[in-house]
Image (spheres, rainbow, N blue to C red):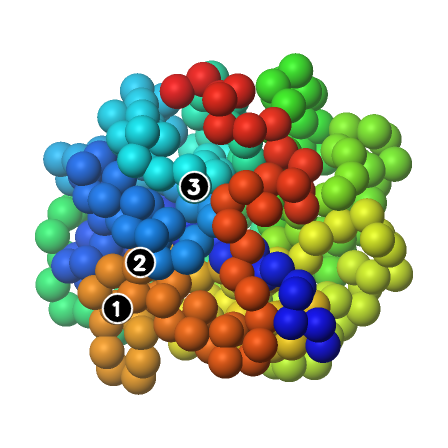
Amino acid sequence: MSSQRKVIITCAVTGSIHTPTMSPHLPITPEEIAAGAIGAAEAGASVVHLHARDPIDGRPSQDPALFRKFLPQIKAASDVIVNITTGGAATMPVEERLQPALTLKPEIASLNMGSMNFGLYEMIPRYNNWQHDWELPYLSGSDERIFKNTFRDIAHILESCSGNDTRFEIECYDIGHLYTALHFLERGLVKPPLFIQSVFGIRGGIGPHPEDVMHMKRTCDRLFGNDYQWSVLGAGRNQMYIATQSAVLGGNVRVGLEDSLWIGKGQLAQSNAMQVAKIRRILEELGLEIATPDETRKILQLKGKNNVNF
């Protein structure tokens, strides 16, 4: 294994999956999100994946005005690459989910490759106290909720943003999603190099077993050859060992409080930077080098931070 290979670290700073009361360290307000992103960048992340929340009650929000409250701070303080979600929350229609990426024109935006069951209800027994009245129903309703992203929805997002030169982080929760990515590559709606983010351990998607990770990687290699960059995220306790497996297999990694609130067994991560620092230590112990933001821009062929709309 070459010690010169550069590994891209993405940090998912805050998201729609977890609720505020589950960890006091999860960024909620614009100031907290900006600080979390900047801290992650200082620890070694070259990409930060960002959602927004209503600062009053922590609800997921796709209001571009909320994103504008923290994106300029991040841009001014860091060279980190900003990745804006088009996933939002499963309760949002596609047009609402699209608005931040469409309006703000980031270097990267995330895009789920399909509709799926997205079960979060198993988290409920772990918590006894709820800070806001929306939280428990949001989780308990996930046993009958579908995250909707049809072929038409995906095409609409891609076509709407086609003039923005935004590179999409193509989120694949199962093997079939890889074939969907190939479908849109063949239609010319996405262009290489594809940035494939394989997601493991979400109820409703592919599992976190090492063979599942290998199956994703083999399928990516067969479908996309040299025309893609591969990254992984493991949900919850799967985070670090799946990231390590990806790095050993030649891939990139994603960590962050959106995907896991923990830094070790029974120990909450006190910041996104703590998780980034941990995976960085692991990767460097393996003899791998961490990609800087500018190196990541070259690897993914991004348009540059001065060509965004924030």
Q: CA distance from mark 2 to mark 1?
A: 7 Å
Task: Examine the image and state in which quarter residue 113 appears.
Answer: top right
Q: Is residue 165 above or below residue 256?
A: above
* Foreground: disc 2 or disc 3: 3
Which mark is drawn over residue 272?
Answer: 2
**First of labels 2, 3 by sequence position:** 3
Quadrant assignment, res 140: bottom left
| Numbered disc 2: secondary structure | helix
Q: Is residue 188 left or right of residue 292?
A: right
What residue is drawn where x is 56% and y is 80%? 286
In x, y percent, where is residue 274?
29, 66
Q: Depth check: 38 or 58 in front?
A: 38
Q: Which residue is mark 1?
A: 269
Percent coordinates x, y for residue 304 in the rendering: 55, 29
Q: Is residue 102 left or right of residue 51?
A: right
Mark 3 and mark 1: Cα distance apart in space: 21 Å
Q: Foreground mark, 3 or 1?
A: 3
Q: Residue 142: horizontal and vertical position, in percent?
A: 41, 54
- Residue 177: horizontal and vertical position, in percent? 71, 52
**Disc 3, disc 1: CB below 8 Å?**
no
Q: What amino acid type should be assigned to the residue bearing mark 3?
A: Val
The residue pinned by badge 3 equals: 80
* Residues tagged 2 and 1 counted as in contact (Cβ below 8 A): yes
Identify the secondary structure beneath mark 3.
loop
Q: Is residue 136 above or below residue 270?
A: above
Farthest front residue?
A: 4
Density class for disc 3 (Cα within 10 Å; few <14, some 14-19, many ≥20) is many
Q: Quadrant of the C terminus?
A: top left
What kind of element bears circle 1? loop
